[in-house]
């Protein structure tokens, strides 16, 4: 394989990983960036979405399961996040240490539940016929399923932009993130907006998990493999900045694919962390910081 062919292959791999990471990180940005909630169980929404995709693969026809899996992943992740917000997080706003410990405990419970239900070994799904093919370019085989994951992320980012730009709920969420007291004074139900943001973040992570199941095995601890990178994406992109999270996900995904191709996986992680630290030395507020009074108070 020539150098350009290798670069193309790594580019596609990096973009597909960045797509999953970006979906998860944008969801995390809603809770971590806008609500200042450190949700260590966020990775488990991705895991739940992956297992729901596996259940759809087992019980539905092969040609229809991907669309059903994506819908189940989004709804399942959103409902679990909503339950966590209503049952735990709502009583811990403004107490970051307690929130971190509580969500870490929830993550451990969900991981053990997944082990009991599906076993400790990863499960896999098979792409349907309309995604099983590939595109060969100069000896490089590009699976259609990875292209599908990339297009799914692009469509989701566009839908999110439209949601925040053109809908009343999106406007309320932006208002609460920038000035909670003024939004409440103008009649916005801030507690409801908090629940919406948390549920939307969980839904996006569940959607990412359903997409990930099509290209990688799903294990009880798969969420923990992504959660650290997702936090890095949120911090690098700019805390609370959804466009920044998307940009940082692409940069980190491509850099990770390139570095893992020329070094070991562990060394690539170290180099990525060093790179993020250097960037933050130059831009402490991230690549695309958002303007928010709530964040300026931190």
Image: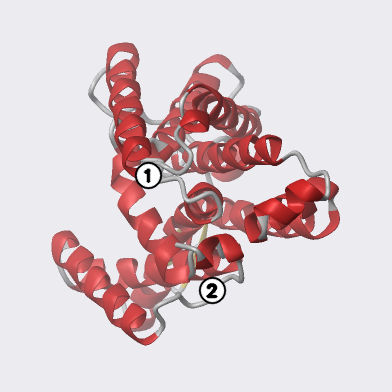
Residue placed at 56% from the left, 65% from the top? Answer: 241
* Quarter of the figure that contains the N terminus: bottom left
- In the shown orientation, is residue 157 left or right of residue 53? right
Q: Decide which of 131, 199 is in the foreground and name it.
A: 199
In x, y percent, where is residue 113? 33, 16
User: Callout 2: helix, strand or loop?
Assistant: loop
**Lateral position of residue 176 relative to residue 298, left or right:** right
Q: Residue at x 52, y 63 (%)?
A: 295
Residue depicted at 64% across the width and 28% down the height: 68
Work out whether residue 99 can be spotted: yes
Instruction: Give the image's coloring scheme.
Output: secondary structure
Question: Split into 4 quadrants, where in the image is the C terminus?
Answer: bottom left
Q: Which residue is mark 2?
A: 289
For disc 1, the marked residue is 96
Crowd band around label 1 with a 10 angstrom C-alpha radius: few (<14), some (14–19), many (20+): some
Q: Residue at 49%, 69% (x, y): give it.
A: 238
The answer, for residue 159, to whether it is visible in the render is no
| Label drawn at residue 27 | none
């Amino acid at each position: 394989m020539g150098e350009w062919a290798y670069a193309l292959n790594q580019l596609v791999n990096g973009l597909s990983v960045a797509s999953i990471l970006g979906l998860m990180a944008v969801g995390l940005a809603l809770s971590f960036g806008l609500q200042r909630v450190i949700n260590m169980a966020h990775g488990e929404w991705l895991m739940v979405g992956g297992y729901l995709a596996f259940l759809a693969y087992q019980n539905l026809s092969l040609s229809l399961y991907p669309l059903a899996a994506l819908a189940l992943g989004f709804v399942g992740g959103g409902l679990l996040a909503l339950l966590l917000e209503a049952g735990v997080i709502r009583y811990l706003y403004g107490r970051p240490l307690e929130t971190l410990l509580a969500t870490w405990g929830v993550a451990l419970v969900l991981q053990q539940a997944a082990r009991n239900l599906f076993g400790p070994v990863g499960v896999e799904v098979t792409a349907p016929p309309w995604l099983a093919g590939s595109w060969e370019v100069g000896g490089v085989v590009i699976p259609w399923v990875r292209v599908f994951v990339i297009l799914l992320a692009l469509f989701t980012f566009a839908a999110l932009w439209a949601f925040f730009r053109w809908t009343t709920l999106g406007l309320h969420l932006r208002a609460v993130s920038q000035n909670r007291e003024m939004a409440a004074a103008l009649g916005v139900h801030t507690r409801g907006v908090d629940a919406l943001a948390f549920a939307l973040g969980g839904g996006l992570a569940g959607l990412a998990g359903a997409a990930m199941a099509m290209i990688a095995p799903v294990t009880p601890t798969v969420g923990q493999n992504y959660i650290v990178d997702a936090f890095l994406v949120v911090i690098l992109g700019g805390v609370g900045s959804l466009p920044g999270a998307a940009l940082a996900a692409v940069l980190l995904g491509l850099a990770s694919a390139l570095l893992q191709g020329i070094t070991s996986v562990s060394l690539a992680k170290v180099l990525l962390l060093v790179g993020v630290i250097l960037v933050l030395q130059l831009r402490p507020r991230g690549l695309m910081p958002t303007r928010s009074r709530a964040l300026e108070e931190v």
